[in-house]
Image: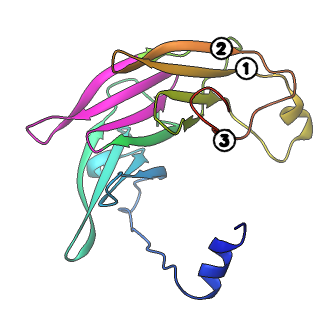
Amino acid sequence: MAYELRDAILAGNISSTFVQARDSTFTKGGSISPDGTKIAVLSRRHGGSGSDDHGIDIWHFGDSGWAEATSIDLGDGFQIADSIYWYSDTEILVIVGTQLRSFTLGNDGNWSSSYSTEIDMGIGENPMHMWVSPDKTVVGLSVDVNWFDEGFMRQTKNIAFVHKVDGKFTSVQTVQMSLGRVTAMSWIDETNV
């Protein structure tokens, strides 16, 4: 089972697609919608802005391939987001600074900020990475990593779990780690990671 992906690539059964962003957009990260027809990407100049205007650019797949369709403004005073996850066909989760923010698609076809949850990692650092549990009831968060600095990676840093309560990720649980920085999480189920 460990080599199924490798074997598929070698057999030519997997193809890749490059989705070209606009010049000077400065995009990073991305997430594919559950139905596979849209891509949401973190952008320093969303929607074709000529200067810094942080947000999310969204591409749709159609008859002529991938095309940029819309964008979401993160709002004044926010830096480029650090992590993004397309939660459902109508909701995108984003880590921005010290917040886990939710953006939802309205009946009018426009995206808007739904709610935000302040995340206190307890260490003076912002969450940077997120992993969503299999049934999508918990989001695991960790801080920044630096693969090339062993001392940095050995630093004890907290992780956080944000539990979904009444349809929103609002219940934050911070866990102190003693093994160094967490670089990835793999969920076994909703309570074991």
Q: Magenta stretch: residue 104 in it?
A: yes
Q: Is residue 62 left or right of residue 83?
A: left
Where in the figure is residue 12, as x and y percent of width and height? 55, 87
Where in the figure is residue 175, as x and y percent of width and height? 71, 16
Could you give the CA–CA distance between mark 1 and mark 2, rounded to whole angstroms? 7 Å
Q: Are marks 1 and 2 in contact (CB under 8 Å)?
A: yes
* Front-lying residue, 118 or 190: 190
> Closer to the observer: label 3 or label 1?
3
Q: Is residue 105 left or right of residue 41?
A: left
Q: Are marks 2 and 3 in contact (CB under 8 Å)?
A: no
Q: Is residue 40 left or right of residue 163?
A: left
Above or below, 104 relative to 16: above
Which stretch did the figure color magenta?
A: 89-116
Q: Magenta stretch: residue 23 in it?
A: no
- Residue type indicated by callout 3: Ser
> Can you identify the residue that label 3 sits on?
186
Image coloring type: rainbow
10 Å crowding of disc 1: few (<14), some (14-19), many (20+): many
10 Å crowding of disc 3: few (<14), some (14-19), many (20+): few
**Quarter residue 74 falls in:** top left
Residue in the image at 54% along x and 13% along y: 172
* Front-lying residue, 13 or 153: 13
Where in the figure is residue 147, as x and y percent of width and height? 80, 46
Above or below, 141 relative to 52: above
The circle on residue 158 is 1
Residue in the image at 48% along x and 21% along y: 99
> Can you identify the residue that label 2 sits on?
174
- Residue type indicated by callout 2: Thr
Q: Earlier in the sequence, mark 2 or mark 3?
A: 2
> Closer to the observer: label 2 or label 3?
3
**Helix, strand or loop at disc 3?**
loop
